Amino acid sequence: SFYFGLTDRWDESICLFHSWYGGEMKPFELLNNRPSKRLEISGEDEIEITDIDTAFVAGATIIFEERLKAAGCLSSDET
């Protein structure tokens, strides 16, 4: 078993990290200190997402949710 987080669920990922490795969450950990520009993708440049990508992310999200619940990192309205 190994730790992983999801970048689109950063705050929960940081909570889970501390659940696994200890320490308390610090406010600076939740800041986006490396913002990036998102590129608009035109129809011609559309990225092809394969079924394996979709399956991988779906499976990872299920594991992530289970770990969040076990660690108490979900808010009460999400449990």
Image (cartoon, helix red, strand yellow):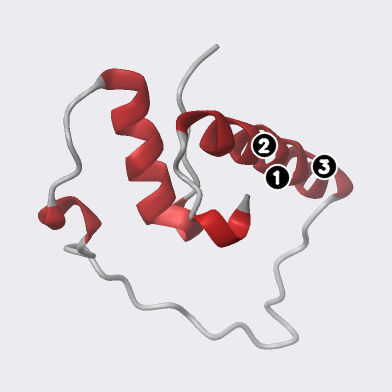
Instruction: Name the residue type under label 3.
Output: Ala
Residue visible at 36% across and 21% down in the picture: 20
Instruction: Name the residue type under label 2.
Output: Ala
Asked if labels 2 and 3 touch by Cβ distance under 8 angstroms, the answer is no
Distance CA(mark 2)–CA(mark 1) = 5 Å
Instruction: Name the residue type under label 1.
Output: Val
Question: Residue 9: x and y, percent?
Answer: 47, 56
Mark 1, residue position: 57
Seen in the picture, residue 22 relative to 47 is either above or below; the reply is: above
Q: What SS does tag 2 mark?
A: helix
Instruction: Work out whether residue 1 or residue 66 is closer to the camera in this orientation and state it.
Output: 66
Number of marks in the rendered image? 3
Q: Which mark is residue 3?
A: none
Question: Residue 39: x and y, percent?
Answer: 48, 80
22 left or right of 71 in image: left
Q: Residues within 10 Å of mark 2 (few under 14, many from 20)?
A: some
Residue visible at 23% across and 22% down in the picture: 22
Q: Which mark is residue 60?
A: 2
Residue visible at 46% across and 31% down in the picture: 71
Residue visible at 77% across and 62% down in the picture: 48
Distance CA(mark 1)–CA(mark 3) = 6 Å
Instruction: Work out whether residue 31 or residue 55 is closer to the camera in this orientation and state it.
Output: 31
Q: What SS does tag 3 mark?
A: helix
Q: Residues within 10 Å of mark 1 (few under 14, many from 20)?
A: few
Q: Quadrant of residue 18?
A: top left
Quick one: which residue is furthest to the right in this view? 51
Q: Quadrant of residue 41?
A: bottom right
Mark 3, residue position: 55
Distance CA(mark 3)–CA(mark 2) = 9 Å
Asked if labels 1 and 2 touch by Cβ distance under 8 angstroms, the answer is yes
